[in-house]
Each structure stands twice: as structure tokens, then as C-alpha cells.
Amino acid sequence: MSQGKRVGIVGAGNVGATVAYSLAMLGSCHEIILRDNKIDVAKGKALDMSQAASAVRSHTVVSVAEEMSDLVDCDVVVVTAGSPRLPGMSRDDLLMINAKITKEVIEGIAKYSPNAIVIMVSNPLDAMTYVALKESGFDRSRVIGMAGILDSSRMAAFIQEKLGYGGGQIRASVMGGHGDDMVPLPRYSTVAGVPLSDVLTNDEIAEIVDRTRHGGAEIVGYLKTGSAYYAPAKSTAIMVDAILKDTKQIHPCAVCLEGEYGYSDVVSGVPVMLGAKGAEKIIEVTLDEKEKAMFAQSCKSVQDLIDTLNKNKFFEGK
């Protein structure tokens, strides 16, 4: 299989289907394979997307894997399968439910697409990325969590809303786990290269940071019956496209740290260079004492989830 031609998506709900649609519209790959327990729904969406691709003269064909064994020889597999986050439910509440689902899905990916790069989207994101890494046995460069692009885009949108200008020129930076302890970095955020502190007050920046941390919950509060999917899906599609096109661009993504920033055997969001081999390089940015403390708290929150999995003997036998 030549590099960058086939993408598998496990979970054809709102996020998975929108990832597939985004990639089909871009013509990023020749084939997208949807896998979902609701096979007829997946077939309907696949047919609809294939027709949309034809409308824009894209060569991408969208098909359906009725069994995991049909999800074969994929270059990239996106995993969105799992229980959604509902109102009043924290990401942590989803831990054991989605860990079991992830384990089953990853076993299939490792068997039928053993050379794939896996992008995890299921929540709690950092813990599910850790589960996928341990269950797959893949190198850490091939198991990447989608969160940083999403959180950074939310922060950028809030900056634009507050300023009333600068759309398309805002570069926001967020590190850490995908949860309430994420680490927005105003010091590394700019508007057309101008530092955020030059265009907003400290109070305004603090308000944006707080809103970014709870950006997902804000949308859940409005939707009532589900969670965000347009921004998560587009953020995922950006990662897939960077891998398929071997762009070597830097994006914030969740990866397992092995000594970087002083942490090991824990997943957290950091800037990484994405290319054909996945997370090919981890970038270590300089953090001040306050930022280091926030990053430490974020890593501890993820470690607590990993500890919970261990206490429940989730990884026994591995």
C-alpha cells in the first residue's frame, strides 16, 4: 500500500462522520473506510459523502467496513468510538467505559492495519491515548491524541471574539491534558505576531484562559444531548492531512512523554512535528515557573486516570 492513500475511521457518529466529510472534501486520500456498529447508518453516510466528493470533483471514495477485518492496510486510523460526554458528565466519568471500547478497537487495528498511525479522539482523550499505546504495542510516534489543535482553536476564537478583529491572524497556544487542567499559554499566543499582552488586559486574558478550559462544556450546555463535533472533527482532519502529506508542520498533540518536560509514561499535549511517520519530533518549549506548575497539575490529572486504570487491573496480562 503506498503511503497516504487509505484512512480508516472507527465510529461514524457526529465526529467521525465529519472527519470523513472534511477529508473527502479535501481529497486527502483515495479511500476512507467507516466502521460503526450501526452498519446501515454508516452505509448511508458513506454513500452521501461519496456523492458529495463527486460534486467537488474529489477522487475520494467513502466505503464501510462491516467487520473490523475489513479495516485493512490503512495508513491512518482515527478512533472516535465511545460513549459521548453528556450534560453533567465529566471526561473522567467516561474512563472505564471508553477504555474497554478502546481496547477492543485497538486490538482490531493492530491485527488488520499493523502499520497504521492511530489518532485517538475518544474521551477522556489523554487516558484513551495511553490505553491505545499500551494495547497496540506501537511506537509512541504512531499513537497520537487529538486535543491541542482543538483547544488552541477554541482559544483563538475567544481571542477574536474579545478583540473584534484579527481573524485568521491569531495563533493561540495550549499545552497539557485535554481537560479542565489544560494549560493555555497566553505568552506564546499572538495576533499577527503581536503579543497577546499588547492587545488585551490581564483580566481579559484570564477570562479567555478560563473559557478555553471549559470550552467543550460550554457547547455541551447549549446542545443538551451531545457534545461538539465540527471543531473536533476539523482539528482531527488537520492532523490526518499533515500525516498523509508529510508536511513536517508543528501542531499541539497528545503523546506519551519519555523524559520530555521531566515526565515519563504519561500522555500530555505538547507541540509535535507531524509527518508520514506520525509524531516525528517532540518540541520542548521553555516554560516559566507558573506554566511549569500548571503543566505539572495537568500531568497529575492524567496520571490519576492511569492510576485508576491500574487499580482496576485494566492492563493485567499486558
Image (spheres, grey):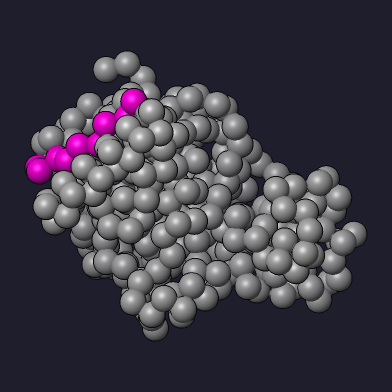
Q: Is residue 29 magenta?
A: no
- Residue 109 position, x and y percent, is 22, 38
Q: Nearer the viewer, residue 291 or 84?
A: 84
Q: Is residue 317 above or below residue 198?
A: above
Q: Residue furthest top?
A: 2
The furthest residue to the front: 55
Q: Is residue 149 visible?
A: yes
What x and y, as percent, mark residue 245? 48, 25
Position above or below: 147 against 112: below
For image coordinates 21% across by 59% down, the residue present is 100
Image height check: is 112 above or below 219?
Answer: above
Q: Position of residue 294 (x, y in %)?
A: 65, 65
**Quadrant that contains the N terminus:** top left
Q: Nearer the viewer, residue 132 or 230?
A: 230
Relative to 118, 176 lies left or right: right
**For this rendering, which residue is in front, 309 or 20?**
20
Q: Residue furthest bottom?
A: 88
Q: Position of residue 315 (x, y in %)?
A: 24, 55
Residue 114 appearing in the image: no
Specify the segment rendered in magenta.
Answer: 59-67
Residue sitting at 71 percent across and 58 percent down?
Answer: 185
What residue is rendered at 35% in x and 72% in y?
226
Q: In the image, is 103 to the left or to the right of 288?
A: left
Q: Picture quarter containing residue 312?
A: bottom left
The residue at the point 85 percent across, 53 percent down is 195
